[in-house]
Image (cartoon, rainbow, N blue to C red):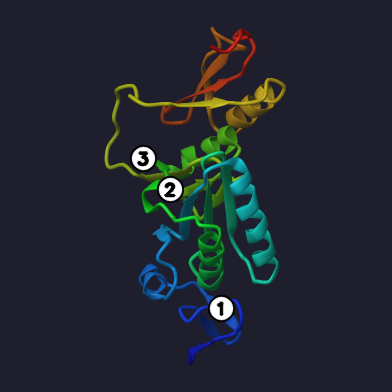
Amino acid sequence: MVAARTTAPGVGASDVRFAGMIRQITAGEFHAADGVEDWRCLYHLVSAHFPTGSLTEGIALVDEIGRLVDEAEQRILAIDLRGTGVTVSLSRRDAGLARRISTAARERGLSADPTAVQVINLTLDALVGADVLPFWRAVLGYSQIGDDYLYDPSRRGPGFGVQQMDEPRPQRNRMHLDIAVPHDQAEARIAAALAAGGHLVSDAHAPMWWVLADAEGNEVCVATWVGRDRAAP
């Protein structure tokens, strides 16, 4: 199939159309495009962070991004607004939108900070990934991609994956996850995790926290505020 470059509005020179469909471009193709110097490829995403002097400045930039997105064919967009800045993540194929966001930021006197973007994934070594992934999907409340990766559908938490381990490690794992959930959702979350192949290690501290483990013994604590109800320092 022959690929044709396009200069349609909202599509950059690094976007490639196949029979009318825009394919995902490589990280190298994205970084070779003009006007995307603010952005960094992180796995399948590109991200840019724009420090602001105030929350008001950040809100103004987000409002402008909203207007730009209305004009573009947007596929992936995540915006993290903080008092200190705005972080934006897009699909690599949205180079045109990335350029327009950078232009909008510059017009407001904002410069990107490439040291402030990252993507964190947690990876669990497992003998049989299919035996443990359903447990972690249930206890994290995540969605699944493929047969070895979970992601937070709200895009707030780190990714979680499993990789093949060659031989068992009989010792207790040295790292576990703590998941704070709404107090009225804890029992449902625990029940889903147990039904997905997990088991209860301890409820000695419930309802502050329960300790669960997957089929290979990797532990996670499901926690609530109940029993911790004190003034914050």
Residue 56, image x and y in percent? 63, 44
Residue type at mark 1 is Val
Label 3 to label 1, Cα distance in Å? 44 Å
Instruction: Give the number of the disc on residue 119.
Output: 2
Question: Within 10 angstroms of label 3, few (less than 14), some, or many (20 or more) residues?
Answer: some
In this rendering, the answer to whether 43 lies above or below 55 is below
Please state which of the two labelled residues, at mark 1 or mark 2, is closer to the viewer.
1
Instruction: Specify the label residue 11 is tagged with.
Output: 1
Marking on residue 127: 3
Marks 3 and 2, how far apart at CA: 26 Å
Front residue (pair 146, 209): 209
Q: Position of residue 25 (x, y in %)?
A: 45, 73
Residue 205 sits in quarter? top right
Q: Marks 2 and 1: in contact by CB < 8 Å?
A: no
Q: Classify 142 as above or below 68.
A: above
Give the amino acid at mark 2: Val
CA neighbours of label 2 inside 10 A, class few (<14), some (14 to 19), many (20+): few
Of labels 3 and 1, the one closer to you:
1
Does dot 3 land on a helix, a strand or a loop? loop
Residue at the location (41% across, 57% down)? Answer: 43
> Is residue 217 left or right of 105 when viewed as pictured?
left
Q: Is 196 rendered above or below residue 34?
A: above
Sequence-wise first label, 1 or 2: 1
Amino acid on which disc 3 is placed: Leu
Q: How far apart, in angstroms, are the residues tagged by discs 1 and 2?
A: 25 Å
Mark 3 or 2, nearer chain start: 2
C-beta proximity under 8 Å, tags 3 and 2: no
N-terminal of the pair, mark 3 or mark 1, is 1
Q: Is residue 153 visible?
A: no
